[in-house]
Image: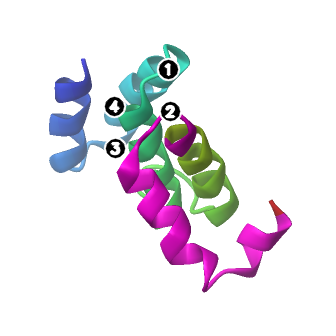
Amino acid sequence: MLQRAEELFERGEYEKALEIFKNLAKEGDAEAMYYIGLMYYEGWGVAKSEQEAIKWWKKSQNRGNLDAKYMLQTICATSSVFARE
């Protein structure tokens, strides 16, 4: 399922990908959580929300995803939103 969601994501079919990613995230999939964060951060298929991105990346990071950890570290220095979380 993750591979299917990634394929949809790469083709720009964000709404379809998001549905699969959210189902996978409910099952604890850290990679899916990372992608959801990315979608919120960039506003791909959803309303752009740095706060929502941070929320998903924190969940992903807590499950060991290094990409999410990197994104959190990257925006930590540049975002006042992160400080409010």
Viewer can see residue 18: no
From the top left corner, tell me how far across and down residue 3 is, in percent: 17, 27
Q: Secondary structure at mark 1?
A: loop
> Disc 4 versus disc 1: distance between alpha carbons?
19 Å
User: Of the numbered discs in the image, which one, if any, rests on residue 63?
Assistant: 2
Q: Residues within 10 Å of mark 3 (few under 14, many from 20)?
A: many
> Disc 4 versus disc 2: distance between alpha carbons?
24 Å
> Disc 4 residue type?
Lys
Residue 74 among those drawn in magenta: yes
Q: Secondary structure at mark 2?
A: loop
Question: Mark 4 against mark 1, which lies toward the viewer?
Answer: 1
Q: Nearer the viewer, residue 31 or 10?
A: 31
Image height of 27 relative to 30, above or below: above
Mark 2 or mark 4, which is nearer the start of the sequence?
A: 4
Q: Residues within 10 Å of mark 2 (few under 14, many from 20)?
A: some
From the top left corner, tell me how far across and down residue 19 is, in percent: 43, 26
Question: Mark 4 against mark 2, which lies toward the viewer?
Answer: 2
Q: Residue at x 21, y 37 (%)?
A: 6
Mark 1 or mark 3, which is nearer the start of the sequence?
A: 3
> Disc 3 versus disc 4: distance between alpha carbons?
5 Å
Query: What span is colored magenta in the figure?
Result: 61-84
